[in-house]
Amino acid sequence: RGDDHDRLWRALQHLTDEQREVLELRLAGLSGAEIASTTRRSLSATKSIQFRALSRLRTVLKSESDSWTILNSDGGTTL
C-alpha cells in the first residue's frame, strides 16, 4: 500500500494546481456543482478540469507502470 500511495503522490505532482484542487474537492465528497461554486468556475469548466486531471493521472501512472515492466523484464535494477 505504501508503494501505491507513493505512486499516486508522484503522479499528482504532474497536475496543475487547479486540477489538483478539483480532484481534492471531488475526493472530499463534493459534487461537480459544489466544486464549481467553491472554486467560482462554471460547471462545464469544472468538469473539463476534472476530465483533464484524470486523463493526465492515467497517462502518468501508465507510463510509470510501463517503465517498471521494462526495468523488470530486462533483468535491470529494480527501483
Image: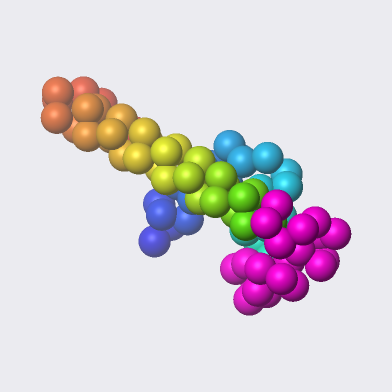
Vertical relation: 64 (above or below) 54: above
Q: Where is residue 73 shown, x and y percent of the image?
A: 14, 30
**Quarter of the figure with the N terminus:** bottom left
**Residue at image point 61% right, 41% down:** 15
Tell which of 47 and 15 is nearer to you: 47
Answer with left or right where residue 39 lies relative to residue 61.
Answer: right
**Residue plotted at (62% across, 57% down):** 47
Q: Which residues are magenta?
A: 26-45
Task: Indicate the position of residue 46 as horizontal and vertical percent values.
Answer: 69, 56
Hey, which quadrant is residue 34 in on the image? Answer: bottom right
Residue 65, image x, y percentages: 31, 39
Residue 43 magenta-drawn?
Answer: yes
Image quadrant containing the C terminus = top left
Up-down relation of residue 26 to residue 45 (above or below): below
**Could one spot residue 78 in this view of the protein?**
no
Q: Is residue 49 above or below residue 23?
A: above
Can the viewer see residue 12?
A: yes
The secondary structure that most of the magenta stretch takes on is helix
User: Going by the image, does 33 lie left or right of 37?
Assistant: left
Tell me what residue is drawn at x 73 percent, y 47 percent: 18
Question: Would residue 66 be found to the left or right of residue 51 on screen?
Answer: left
Residue appearing at x 42%, y 45% in the figure: 58
